[in-house]
Amino acid sequence: HTEMAEAETSNTVNPARQTIALAAVGSIRKFVCEELLADDRFDVVVISRGRDPCFTSRDVPIRVSDYSHDSVLSIIDDTNATALLSFLNLNDERYITIHRAFLSACLASKTCKRLMPSEYCGDVETWPDRPRFYCTTREPFRQILRTEAKDLEWTCIENGWFMDYFLPKEKSYMRPVPDEFPIDLDAWTARVRGTGDEPQSWTQAREVGKAIVALLGSKTAWEPITYVCGQWGTYNKAIKTMESFYNRPIPRTHTPAAEIRDYVAANLHHDQIYAVQAVMCDGWSVDGATAVPREKTLRQRGKYFTGCTFSGLEEVLRMAEGKEEEGVL
């Protein structure tokens, strides 16, 4: 029965601390979970369709759910969760259906009045429909939040690209996405999209997790959109940083911006969105839409994240090199 709040471990919730519910799969969820477990202000409950060894090995309570309103509501109220964080990485109609259930569960909950939907995008205020497949998922749900979430505190976390994609796969929980990210470490190649001088931003995944924990612990009211960034730059500069760090040239291919934009425009209504997702990510980058707004990001850093560190690419590469062979950064 999918409504069963089935605990897969014997761990119990400490009533003296806030319980944070982490819903759905997602590599970033592992970083957030570890940072919450390291903070004695919080307990964690994972809401999932099934078991995940990553969490059972940490003795984290797992509650099985079908992500329906009734199922999620029973779990968050049973655990006295105060916030629900979604990591649902879907780019079709299921994203809105499930997030509507998360929203309605929080609205009906006795205790859970904070919501972070699954976002992790770029400058969504200037470019609300980038990448283009988000125009039927993330942006419509942001509009739903603006009109229906009056009794909740909510925010969308935006960080540009995860900097972990520059790292060897054994150094991060983030799975490589060589079809979407322009640098493929395994093949040691780079796909320069557009001129390569378009503005970008990148943030290391664990530092995003630490920022989320800081936001959960903040007594300052959340803003609807929250930006974090480790480094602003361009892919041309990032490739040079990689070549300098590894003392090895990276072979490059080039795709003109016009070619990418023409392809995106011709496939906006493709009936198989996942088949064209990679090129839409290319369009996101050539538009400069991955780059979070500097002024607002720095203002929010001073407002919410004074205790957080945000590292640049070269520093993250050095930190990864210093980890043991199988160590996750």
Image (cartoon, rainbow, N blue to C red):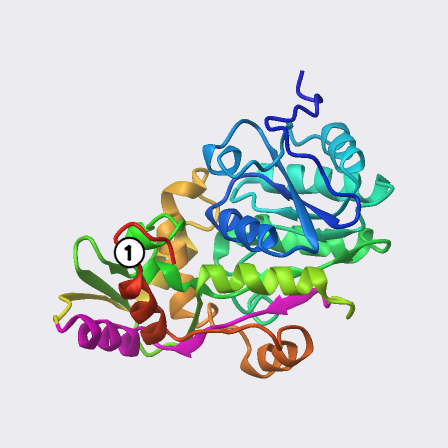
Residue 23: percent from the left, percent from the top? 62, 40
Q: Residue furthest top?
A: 1
In this rendering, the answer to whether 223 lies above or below 111 is: below
Residue 303: in magenta span: no
Task: Judge from the rendering whether residue 191 lies leftward or rightward of residue 105; answer left or right.
Answer: left
Question: Mark 1 highlights which residue?
Answer: 324
Q: Residue at x 70, y 21 (%)?
A: 4
Q: Residue at x 58, y 72 (%)?
A: 126
Q: Is residue 287 visible?
A: yes
- Nearest to the observer: residue 30 or residue 177: 30
Q: Residue at x 17, y 54 (%)?
A: 187
Residue 129: percent from the left, percent from the top? 55, 60
**Residue 128's quadrant in the figure?**
bottom right
In this rendering, the answer to whether 122 lies above or below 96 is: below
Residue 289: percent from the left, percent from the top? 48, 69
In this rendering, the answer to whether 56 lies above or below 83 is: above
What range of the chain is rendered magenta?
A: 223-247
Task: Judge from the rendering whether residue 328 lies leftward or rightward of residue 306; answer left or right.
Answer: left
Tag 1: amino acid: Glu
Q: Residues within 10 Å of mark 1 (few under 14, many from 20)?
A: few
Looking at the rendered structure, the secondary structure element under dot 1 is: loop
Which quarter of the figure is the N terminus placed in?
top right
Residue 97: percent from the left, percent from the top? 66, 37
